[in-house]
Image (cartoon, rainbow, N blue to C red):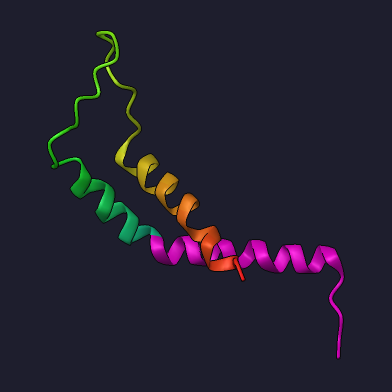
């Protein structure tokens, strides 16, 4: 059985993460775009306008939050 050097293993995991991100990003982009059409919840905070990301930024944030669950176990 061959053992991997820790840095090689980290590099491999980072590569897998980027590949999964690239593969799933279009799905998250579609979800973020559809979420913009839903009526907004009452997000008023003392009269301040809610801070919003771009649709692309929101899709990336959704993907980065969800993908680590693929590496659990």
Q: Quadrant of residue 13?
A: bottom right
Whether residue 15 sits left or right of residue 6 in the image: it is: left
Residue found at the far bottom of this picture: 1
Query: Viewer-proximal residue, 46 or 5?
Result: 46
Q: Residue at x 48, y 50 (%)?
A: 65
* Horizontal side, residue 18 vs residue 31: left or right: right
Residue at left 24%, top 8%? 47
- Which secondary structure dominates the residues rendered in magenta? helix
Residue under the point 32% across and 35% down? 54
Start and end of the magenta stretch?
1-24
Residue drawn at (24%, 18%) of the image: 44
Residue 62 location in percent, x, y? Answer: 40, 49
Front residue of 7 and 72: 72
In this rendering, is residue 46 above or below 7? above
Membership of 48 in magenta stretch: no
Position of residue 69 measured from the top left corner of the image (x, y, whole percent): 52, 62
Between 64 and 40, the one lying in front of the other is 40
Q: Quadrant of the N terminus?
A: bottom right
Residue, far top? 47
> How many marks do you count on the picture?
0
> Is 23 part of what is drawn in magenta?
yes
Q: Is residue 6 left or right of residue 14?
A: right
Q: Is residue 49 above or below residue 61?
A: above
| Quarter of the figure that contains the C terminus | bottom right
In the image, residue 65 sits, relative to residue 49, either above or below, namely below
């Amino acid at each position: 059985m061959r053992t991997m050097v820790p840095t090689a293993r980290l590099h491999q995991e980072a590569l897998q993460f980027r590949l999964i991100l690239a593969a799933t990003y279009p799905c998250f982009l579609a979800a973020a775009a559809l979420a913009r059409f839903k009526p907004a919840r009452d997000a008023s905070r003392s009269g301040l306008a809610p801070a919003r990301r771009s649709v692309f930024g929101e899709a990336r944030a959704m993907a980065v939050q969800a993908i680590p669950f693929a590496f659990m176990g």
